[in-house]
Image (cartoon, coloured by chain):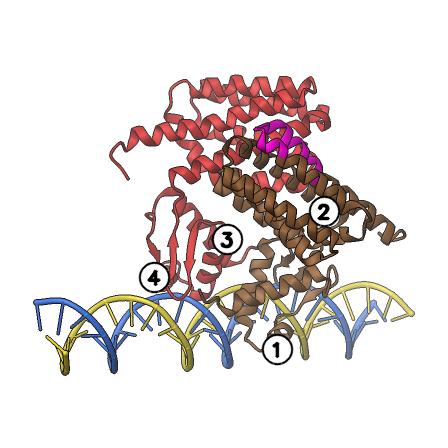
Chain colours: A brown, B red, C yellow, D blue
Amino acid sequence: MDRKRADVIADELERMILDGTFADGERLDEVQLAARFSVSRTPIREALQRLAQSRLVEQVPRRGVFVHQPGPVELIEMFEVMAELEAVCARLAASRITDAALADLHATNARCTASVEAQDADTYFRENERFHAIIYRQSGNAFLEQECLRLHRRLQPFRRMQLRLRGRLRQSMTEHEAIVAALQSGDGPRAAEVIRGHVAVQGEKFHLLMASLKPAAE
Amino acid sequence: MDRKRADVIADELERMILDGTFADGERLDEVQLAARFSVSRTPIREALQRLAQSRLVEQVPRRGVFVHQPGPVELIEMFEVMAELEAVCARLAASRITDAALADLHATNARCTASVEAQDADTYFRENERFHAIIYRQSGNAFLEQECLRLHRRLQPFRRMQLRLRGRLRQSMTEHEAIVAALQSGDGPRAAEVIRGHVAVQGEKFHLLMASLKPAAE
DNA sequence: GTCAAGTTGCTTGTATACAATGTCTCCACG
DNA sequence: CGTGGAGACATTGTATACAAGCAACTTGAC
């Protein structure tokens, strides 16, 4: 499947916005971007519209598009929704999960733990993502799975900041173990409860992190 | 705020797809639509891309866009997610809801019941939508509220089909009362449980309806 | 000196022209 | 008679030209 240029530009712009290349509230000029990517305005406009639907930019008619970095409140809210969605996935998965998926969860968790020991951040994130993706899939609800993947992807850059918190990773792995154990025993409510806390704490930790990084901001 | 042409066209196309004007799998020709709306291809393309992000149409590169009517399985899944999302809203709202909102819920419910008696379907749906919107809002999570409104809007046309089921509306109102009662007493888990069933049953009823309407289909 | 109105310039929204690509058909060859 | 390839056609993707609208600046009057 060959993607059209507008798609790769949308991904690139998304990456740039999430990386902080563009400041919050900054206006994205169509012609500048067109020149930057060596394309015409049309693909740029398509890309910007896609970003607008993801709420990464705000489109003001006849004024332009402005990048919309989610503020602390919005982030907390998004993490709260993510936690609830994952809790639903876990609850449903507890009764629907296959033995193969359980084995996969165990293996993924092992690789995840190993990467923590090895301080291999990239592998950690890849395996961590895989862990959660398996649970989404095992909810047995393809629509739910898609929604979870979408939100997970949007929150990903903010999860990365947690690397700086000492001891968080080890605690996180312990939670993963507890989740798998609950799933294995078919205890849906418990799995939901554990994973809800596991995800929600990320939002709270992020909050703390933000507060400590820019104490005088806002 | 004056919307641009592409926006109203997107809404119009969305309405047409949901109304069944376009069959599932039908290709939407850009030039035909352009002629139909008396605009150029550009606004049509923008509208189609918006619909593609809502999964109402599928965009195949170099092939065109095809309407994607959600099948029975996908619908069941969407209703399941809707039920879970509303359950989360109710649980959160139970501890955050204001007295004013509670009064509003009571009033809305009263109007809803009255419209059932008067067999005023339009009023019923408007008030029913308001009822659920209040709960979304009272979750205290603006992001969650937006997501709920999005999904609710997508499922709306399928909810309408339930009018044909005798006695469903009265049952539905009884459930509304139970939800309000749980919220008023601050019983989050109970409110969540009731509203989950209230929404999930719609998916199941819909399933029955589909099966009874086209028994030999598929 | 200040306020207001007109004009200019820049930006977005729309239309059309062009390019690239996929598909379908038709003809030739095995 | 079937199959494969080449070419034409149709459709999407991209570029550019044009129109419309808003904002800011300048200029003139009070």
Give the structural element (helix, strand or loop) at label 2. helix
Upstream in the sequence, badge 3 or badge 4? 4
Give the structural element (helix, strand or loop) at label 4. helix
Are marks 3 and 1 in one subunit? no
Q: Quadrant of the C terminus of chain B?
A: top left
Q: Of the residues shown, which amino acid type is indicated by label 4?
A: Gln
Mark pair 3, 4: CA separation:
21 Å
Q: Mark 2 points at which residue?
A: A75
Q: In this view, does A27 lie above or below A160?
A: below
Q: Is residue A192 magenta?
A: yes
- The chain letter under disc 2 is A
Residue lying at 57% horizontally and 67% vertically, measured from the top left: A9
Mark pair 1, 2: CA separation:
33 Å
In the image: residue A11, left or right of residue B30? right
Q: Of the residues shown, which amino acid type is indicated by label 2?
A: Leu
Q: Where is residue A92 in the image (x, y as percent from the top left)?
A: 54, 32
Are marks 4 and 2 in one subunit? no
Q: Please give the range of residues in magenta.
A: A181-198
